[in-house]
Image (spheres, grey):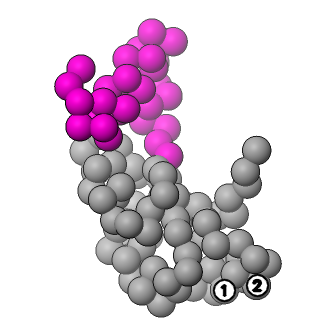
Amino acid sequence: MPYYAGVVTPTEIMKALSLGLTTLKFFPASDFGGLKTIKSLCAAFPQVTLMPTGGVNESNVKEYLAFPKIVACGGSWMMKGSAEEIEETVKRAVALVKGDTV
């Protein structure tokens, strides 16, 4: 199972890079500037790809994923409710990302 170290600051990214890590989790994304901050960080560290979590939801996931330095998005918004509700939310999320209709 892959492990993605969490980062927020340039210092944390530099530490991760010193350990040979280039795909990193950016958390909590919305609390630290979201996509605007991610774009700035990736300009300074072009070898890094990020997986934002924290504040990612149905209204912004496509915007995040449109940025080429983002490899995936996490979101607890998909994991709320009963098993059936979670299943429906995940189906909607997959369809949204793929550009399909549910």
Residue 39 location, x and y as percent? 37, 77
Residue 43 location, x and y as percent? 42, 86
Q: Which residue is mark 1?
A: 14
Residue 81 location, x and y as percent? 46, 18
Asked which quadrant contains residue 29, the reply is: bottom left
Could you say whether the residue bearing mark 1 is in a helix, strand or loop? Answer: helix
Q: Going 70% across and 81% down the picture, which residue do you hit?
A: 17
Q: Seen in the image, is 20 located left or right of residue 42?
A: right
Q: Seen in the image, is 61 located left or right of residue 51?
A: left
Q: Which residue is mark 2?
A: 18
The dot on residue 68 is none
* Residue 90 appearing in the image: yes
**Does the magenta portion include 84?**
yes
Label 1 is placed on what type of residue?
Met
* In contact (CB < 8 Å): disc 1 and disc 2: yes
Asked which quadrant contains residue 91, the reply is: top left
* Residue 28 appearing in the image: no
Instruction: Name the magenta segment's main secondary structure.
Output: helix
